[in-house]
Amino acid sequence: MKFRIKESFLNALYPRCCPICHQILKEQNWLICPKCEGELKPIGEPRCKKCGKRIFYMEKEYCQDCSRREHVFDEGRGIFDYDERMRASLLKYKDGGRREYGDFYAQAMIRYGGIDLRRWRPQAVLSVPIHPRKKRIRGFDQAGYLAKVVAEATGLPLCCGYMRKKSVTSAQKSLEASIRRKNLKNSFEGREGDWQIRRLLVIDDVYTTGSTVDAVSEEAKRHGVENIYFLTVCIGRGD
């Protein structure tokens, strides 16, 4: 089953590239080339029952991280392993001008996360907020774009302006989990009042330790949200 979009005039001016091998796509209504589509596999079972990380022993229910500490969110999953190939792809998406990669990511989240979405029954979609300064530097909101496509495809309302990032935090990927949690504590601020949302889907590009999703979830629960689920393009290792 091919990942496809409608062809447009912009495709002729700015040819779409494969998000994995980064070559110009032979057919501009493709989202990924056939070779890479055949090689790129979503995370299947066994995976952590809490965060969805790949685990390597059938008898285990949770990854090491989720076995050691409790998370604020209820459940989630990342679609692909956060390996070198996907790390390079996401870097080009966020900082290399390849915004069209977001179309493939979002469609993969919808396709491979569909069973989970039907089970979770979220009432709305929220992207992990980006600080305005970082958005100006990057030129766009990478998680916000993914959330927009997911919301449109599922018919769920998109929570625009419900939460903001109050401060610029240092790059989290190289930090220990405890330091990440400290950095992110109180870094998000939600719109005042009860949001009238009980089951919320949070969208981001990468999940590593869960500190970011937890911080967003903690703030969302202050505004009446009861159950919080997440979908990300990629997720770290579970061992």
Image: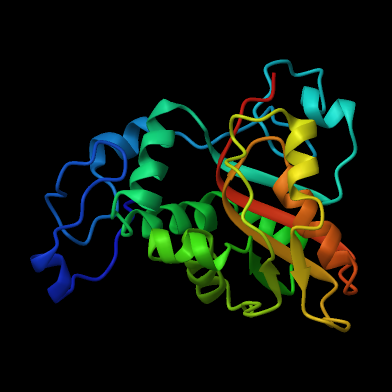
216, 73: nearer the viewer: 216
175, 115: nearer the viewer: 175
Q: Could you tell whether 205 is left or right of 73 in the image?
A: left
12, 212: nearer the viewer: 212
Q: Could you tell whether 30 is left or right of 46 in the image?
A: left
Q: Tag count in the figure?
A: 0
Q: Quadrant of residue 178?
A: top right
Camera sees residue 141? no
The scheme the figure's colours follow is rainbow
Relative to residue 10, is residue 194 depicted above or below? below
Camera sees residue 52? yes
Q: Quadrant of residue 138?
A: bottom left
Give x and y (percent) for residue 16. Answer: 20, 56
| Residue depicted at x 67% and y 17% | 56
Give x and y (percent) for residue 173. Answer: 59, 34
| Residue depicted at x 13% and y 75% | 9
| Residue depicted at x 14% and y 55% | 27
- Quarter of the image that includes the C terminus: top right
Give x and y (percent) for residue 10. Answer: 16, 71
Q: Could you tell whether 41 is left or right of 167 in the image?
A: left
Give x and y (percent) for residue 72. Answer: 86, 50
Relative to residue 16, is residue 33 depicted above or below? above
Q: Could you tell whether 35 is left or right of 148 in the image?
A: left
The extreme left residue here reads: 12
